[in-house]
Each structure stands twice: as C-alpha cells, then as structure tokens.
Amino acid sequence: TGNFSPPDFGITMLGNSHGFDKSGTTTGFIIWIYGTGVAVDPPPHCDAYLIMNGVSPRLVTSVILTHCHADHDAGTFQKVLKERRVTLYTTKTVYQHFIRKYSAVSGLNADFLNRLLDFKQVNIAEPTFLHGAVFEFFYSLHALPCIGFKVTCGGKTMSYSADTFNDPDGLDMLEKRGIISEARKQSLLNFPWECDVVLHECGVPPIHTPASTLQKLPEAVKNNLYAVHIADGAAEEAGLRKAVAGFENTIVIHNNTRPNDLAIQTLLLCAQADIFRDADINQCIHLLQMSSRHRYRCGYEFNGTMGGVFFIISEGVLRVERDNKEPIILKLGDYFGEISAMNGGMEHMRLTAITNVEIIDINKFAFNQFLQSCPEAHQRLLTLESMR
C-alpha cells in the first residue's frame, strides 16, 4: 500500500454488494476528480480503509448520499460523527429523511446533527459543479426517494444508477396500472447508457433492476458497463462484469492533466490543512507563490538536523523519526512541521521515503508571512503549541 495516486478522473470501489450479502461489502465508491475524492454512499469504516491504503481521508471530505436505506447511509452517518467535517451533497428530500432517521436512531437532536456537517442541496436536472466536474442528478425508482447521476469531467463521462427499478417492460406495466405517469416513465428510460463508464445496480425487482435487463443491453453499452449492488455468485451466474473493489482495481476514465492542475492540487492539499482554512483569495495566491515541490525516490534517507519547514505530502509515503518520539507515517494529504515553521525550532530527525515521494514545502519565512496576514491561523497554532 502507499503507491496509490488518484487519477484525474476515475472510480475506486469501496464495496460492490448489497446489505443482505454476508460475504460482501455494501456498494459505495469514490469518484476521483483531479486528485480530490467524492465518496458516494461510503460503507462504514471508509476512512480507516483509506488510511490502510495510504490515502489521507483529508482528500475525501465530500459525500453524495443517494438514499436512506441503511446499507447506503450508515457509513455516511458514521463519517459525520467520527471523522473530519464533511460536505454532504443530496436533495433536500433525502437530506431531511437522513436527519430525521438518525436523530431518531441516535437520540441526538436534529439541530445538533445539522451543525455537524455542511449540507449542499442538489436540484434534479440542474448542473452541480464539484471539484472541476459537472454532476447532473436524476431521481431513480426505488422504495423511497433515491437519486442517481451523470458526471462529466475533461470530456469524459460516467453514470451511476443508484438503487432503481430500470426494466422497460416493468415500467410499461407500472404506467398502464397508473402507478407512474408517462413523463415519469420516459425520464427513467432516459438513463445515460452512453457514458464512458456506467455503474448500474442489479437485484430483485420491483425495487431493483433484474439481471435480464442488463443482459439485453447492446454490446456497445455492455462494454462500458459494471454491475454493482450484486453478490459475486449472482453476477457470475448472470454473466455480468462486476465492478471490483480495491484501490488496485481503480477504474481510470482519464488522466488528461490540465495546465492549471498543479496549482489546483496545491490549493486543494493546503485547503485540507486546518491551518489554511481561513485563507482568503489573496492569501491563497501567496501560498502558491511561496510553495515549492521536491521529489525523492523510494529508499531516499535524510538523517540530520532539520526544522523551520512546513510540508505536505502530495504523493507517496514518508516515514518520520524524531528523537524520543514514536515514528510517524505520512501519506498523501498529510502535513508536518507547522510548529517548527512558526518558531524556527530545529531538531534531529530521520526521513525515509517508503515509496517515491513528492513534497510541497513552505519555509519558515514564507510560513510566518502567511501567519502575519492570517491572525486566526496564528492563534490556532499558538494554542496547539501550548498543548504539546
């Protein structure tokens, strides 16, 4: 672990099965957009899984919640309670359901739960701009309100059905019985099958899509199709390609780096550090101008006196050993040295590149210039120093 570098646009499955599969993990995944992750219905212990694979949870603080069945929302609730503050993207209907449900389940006041996260409302059929990609949300057909979406990034696309009944014959029957309207049926039939990558659920109708529907799709569509929300044995029996969980199985949709991506990545990594959360636009420009990048090959070692530098890991895994302190492992998105950069302190340490490593660093002069322009960050560091 530790060698994972997020694609400019891609998907890492965290789980690919359903809530009744004792051998599988519930369906959830990360959409990577220019180095930043958006978690979709993350399974429980998502952040622990990220850390285990050398990825800092700081890179994944946006969450899309499709609906409020426990196999899709339990991990989101855990993330809200236990991890860093998250920004939750969903419709107002799904969000209100989520808050009411977990207020009742946990006994926590709804107003308190609202304060634990940042809710960003998405609207059906209106574009939502997120991390350099465009999301278009639509309602699926499930036992309760549920949303799917299409994502466009760098000229490539992916779509996700979420839990839905998407069978043309079945939808015709529902329309004839007056359960859904003609317009509703057409909106469901207009699922974006044409995308470069299609994640579509599969399960037991009438609240899931039968395997036969996916089997009947044109070959051109099936070439881009990955089945999810289905047990391994059922997918194999149906002859469906299943999206495989694991960072090593990440689906890379494109790696078309843009001219300004290096600057954007630097700002995104800085934004995940609490120190810079109050920075305004002018201070962000200064951060870009003051920072520098350095690369080190796997096995590189530094053993000596060091200090007065703040750095963020932008790639790879670095081991840091200091006198009389436990060694620490820094991974993508982790940062180190903020106190010594502030006070200029020096100490003996040993740095070892466990993999190829890239570091963004800001020296003490530049760092203190930033602190002078941002009193809130300065005060936070002074408080942290007094606690150590």
Image: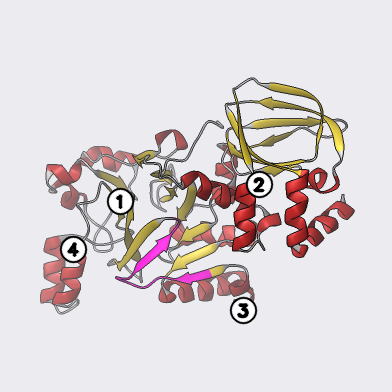
Name which residue type carries label 1: Met
Q: State the separation of the CA atoms marked 3 and 2.
A: 41 Å
Q: Position of residue 74 (x, y in %)?
A: 51, 59
Magenta residues, start to end: 119-131
At label 2, which amino acid type do we have?
Met
CA distance separating discs 4 and 2: 49 Å
Query: Which residue bears the numbered disc 1?
Result: 158
Provide the residue designation for mark 3: 111
- Rendered image: mark on residue 190: 4
Relative side of 248 to 211, left or right = right
Q: Is 213 located above or below residue 56 in the figure?
A: below
| Marks 3 and 2, the one that precedes in the sequence | 3
Which quarter of the figure has residue 49? top right
Nearest-to-viewer mark from 1 and 4: 1
Q: Are marks 1 and 2 in contact (CB under 8 Å)?
A: no
Q: Nearer the viewer, mark 3 or mark 4?
A: 4
